[in-house]
Image (tube, rainbow, N blue to C red):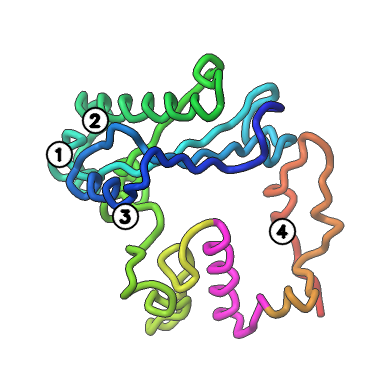
């Protein structure tokens, strides 16, 4: 862990980015994969929920086709098709997983020799758990005709139904989804919570959220916290 810089790695083996997207659209896995590598254990070294003591958590992401034929499927998980024991699915998943590890090993030398656990998710996994079309992980398609104000706002035409998440006007990513949650809460409460935070308002009693040692769990500590009064 001490040898890995606190940064994200964007690995591009070619300037032909459109060609990589075209490969995905046509159901092909490129010989060389684009990669995004992030090391959560370096960003937050004292949190054992990320990785056990003495270990490091590394995430490697890439673009791959969601095409059912590539993965040996016919209808996909949302139609009820089972895939966990599908030999073709497992073969493609394993091949891509090893290709990602090989690529990451060039960025972080010696990585392959120190792996104690690895787990992979595919577009099929994403579809199974979220029912997203094509196994996409960032909500509605990021297209020019449905981005920014063209995406759904938190408040809908249905009374009592509010939206949050990557498919709303706040878009995807950690920051986008966090802002979406604040935006949704603002609509429900009829207040501008973003402005209130900017003006210094504190939601909750800070003394109840103070870390309490290595076994302190922020999730448990925040349960039942009463919002601060005006």
Disc 4: which residue: 224
Is 187 in the magenta?
yes
Label 3, residues with CA under 10 Å away: few <14, some 14-19, many ≥20: some
Is 11 in the magenta?
no
Above or below — where is 227 with respect to 137? below
Chief SS of the magenta region: helix
Tag 3 secondary structure: loop
- What whole-number distance in Å separates the C-alpha atoms at marks 3 and 2? 19 Å
- What whole-number distance in Å separates the C-alpha atoms at marks 1 and 4? 48 Å
Q: Is residue 1 left or right of residue 133?
A: right
Please give the count of numbered marks on the rendered protein.
4
Look at the image and give the residue range highlighted in magenta. Answer: 174-194
The label number, if any, that marks residue 69 in the structure image: 1
The label number, if any, that marks residue 89 in the structure image: 2
Give the percent coordinates (x, y) of residue 208.
82, 55
Q: Earlier in the sequence, mark 1 or mark 2?
A: 1
Q: Earlier in the sequence, mark 3 or mark 2?
A: 2
């Amino acid at each position: 862990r001490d040898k890995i810089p606190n940064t994200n790695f964007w690995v591009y083996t070619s300037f032909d980015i459109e060609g990589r997207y075209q490969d995905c659209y046509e159901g092909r896995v490129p010989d060389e994969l684009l990669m995004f590598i992030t090391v959560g254990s370096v960003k937050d070294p004292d949190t054992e929920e990320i990785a056990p003591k003495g270990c490091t958590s590394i995430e490697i992401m890439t673009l791959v086709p969601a095409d059912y034929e590539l993965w040996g499927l016919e209808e996909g998980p949302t139609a009820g098709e089972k895939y966990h024991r599908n030999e073709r699915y497992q073969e493609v998943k394993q091949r891509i997983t090893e290709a990602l590890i090989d690529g990451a090993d060039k960025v972080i030398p010696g990585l392959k020799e120190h792996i104690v656990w690895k787990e992979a998710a595919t577009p099929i996994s994403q579809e199974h758990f979220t029912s997203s079309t094509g196994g996409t992980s960032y909500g509605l398609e990021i297209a020019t005709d449905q981005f920014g104000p063209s995406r759904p706002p938190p408040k809908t035409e249905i009374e009592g139904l509010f939206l949050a998440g990557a498919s709303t006007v706040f878009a995807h990513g950690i920051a986008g989804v966090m802002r979406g949650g604040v935006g949704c809460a603002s609509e429900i409460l009829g207040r501008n919570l973003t402005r209130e935070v900017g003006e210094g308002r504190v939601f909750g009693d800070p003394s109840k959220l103070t870390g309490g040692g290595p076994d302190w769990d922020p999730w448990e500590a925040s349960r039942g916290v009463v919002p601060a009064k005006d």
